[in-house]
Amino acid sequence: MTKKTKEPTLDFTTDWAYAPAPEDTKHISLKKQYDLFINGEFVKPNSKKYFATYNPATEEKIADIAEANEKDVDNAVKAARKAFEKWSKIPAKERGKYIYRIARLMQERAREFAVIETMDGGKPIRESRDIDVPLAANHFFYYAGWADKLEYAFPNRTPKPLGVAGQIIPWNFPLLMAAWKIAPALATGNTVVLKPAETTSLTALKLAELIRDSGLPDGVVNIVTGAGKTGAAIVNHPDINKIAFTGSTDVGKMIQKAIAGTDKKLTLELGGKAANIIFEDAPLDQAVEGIVNGIFFNQGHVCCAGSRLFVQESVADIVIRKLKDRMETLIVGDPMDKNTDIGAINSKEQLLKINKYIKIGKDEGAEMYQPSCGIPSKGNFCKPTLFLNASQSHRVVQEEIFGPVLTVQTFRTIEEVIEKANNIPYGLSAGVWTDKGSKIFNLTAKLRAGVVWANTYNKFDPTSPFGGYKESGFGREGGLHGLMPYLKF
Ligand code: NAI
Ligand code: MG
């Protein structure tokens, strides 16, 4: 165990830009077995149980992960409660220093995080390296800055931390979602019990090592691993003050029911089925790039993915032709290869779900298109897929597939596309492509979506709030808004 430093010291000498290429896997350190991170140290689970985590691209086992039971969760909550008494009282500026230190250490270990993220979850290394890890570090930097400025963030009010936050995250952006949850909780003086998703625990456990090395006081962040039962033990623990959940709408609803009548605070970031809308006056080549990025980024395992394409009828033929041509050039395969565009589907389960939806789409009568690329014979892979001439009532249009599958609909008027875009149970995000600023403002006001991108897609920034309407959940993460769910006034 690394010796703990008392005072966090900040080191700004290493520049992220000089970090070595992450595709070099020689220097990553992985253990065969991972325990639970409770009260500043790794401890064996009371359950005595471990489960395997696999590389979805090779189907090889990477490591065994501890399964936390109710007793383990209780130990983690007790550690977090004890730590809260101190953490909430240290000067806010000191809290900020610890969080800056986590951000710095993450940058220094960026290569290792990127490689492990790709190995464990299947996303292309280019994305882990250029998006997930730098954004995760940025999130810590951003919230570190707020730690001693809360009275300015909320003038004339006296913000106070809630206590212990239980945080449950999904497998599509494992490290980034951990950062989205932990950084604002710490900045506001709360302590944390976080559970990563069962298929992607490794970067959260690496983060636990980093947090231990950072000298953060014991028990401020606890990381317990396991599946739904472990998650439920967090949700139902009586000494937790807040639950922050990102994942499926089904589980989100269960959590909402489970905590009804308690005074736990709740934020839910759930599914989505975003409309990506292309008008005839849009820069079409750019729009095609935006369509591809909107749905094929991270294999389509993105809650805000632009999974429903709406193209204005007058340009539909040309956009679809350009889109098909572009799809021919996409490389599907080894996530560790920096040229790969579409990596591995995160789990066998998820691949089965996507394939089920592809069959449903065909049976419903939409016209399926896939490019001629091959896919590796081993591992969980899926070709990028279009459903042309899809209609609003098709299940592939209404339901979240969470894979590289795009439905294509055409429209004539603005009113028609707004009506169709909103006619869905979800309301997380949307995209608009047009040359006209007035059209953008008209649409952003009428689209029932928490985030609307204009002439771009899937752009994330820690300063910008993110969250949904309707069955996409409630509460915001990111930005000033992201502080509020962790405070009482
Ligand atoms: P899930 O909602 O079951 O998993 C998300 C997290 O919740 C994981 O950490 C899981 O262990 C935990 N969990 C599961 N059951 C729980 C319970 N009863 N109480 C507390 N925590 C619990 O998602 P799953 O099954 O992995 O994926 C199924 C579908 O959900 C996907 O195909 C996709 O459509 C959607 N999904 C959406 C996400 C988003 O970011 N909007 C993320 C993950 C999944
Ligand atoms: Mg599940």
Image: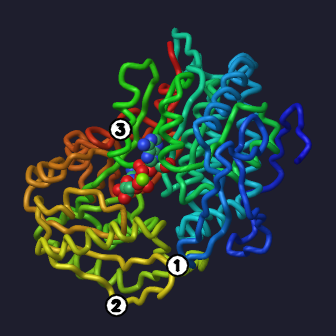
Q: Earlier in the sequence, mark 3 or mark 2?
A: 3
244 vs 143, left or right, is left
At mark 2, the secondary structure is loop
Residue situated in front as seen by the camera: 87 or 442:
87
Query: Number of callouts in the render?
Result: 3
Identify residue for label 3. 254
Q: Amino acid at mark 1?
A: Thr
Residue at image location 57% in from the left, 49% down from the top:
226
Q: Quadrant of residue 277?
A: bottom left
Q: Under 8 Å from ligand 1: the CB of mark 3?
A: yes
Mark closest to the chain's N terminus, 3 or 1: 3
Q: Which mark is residue 372?
A: 2
Residue 76: where, in percent of width, then height?
A: 66, 33
Whole-angstrom CA distance, mark 2 to mark 1, is: 16 Å
Three-letter amino acid code at the position of disc 2: Ser
Residue at 33% from the left image edge and 66% from the top image edge: 353
Q: Earlier in the sequence, mark 2 or mark 1?
A: 1
Percent x, y for residue 68?
A: 61, 44
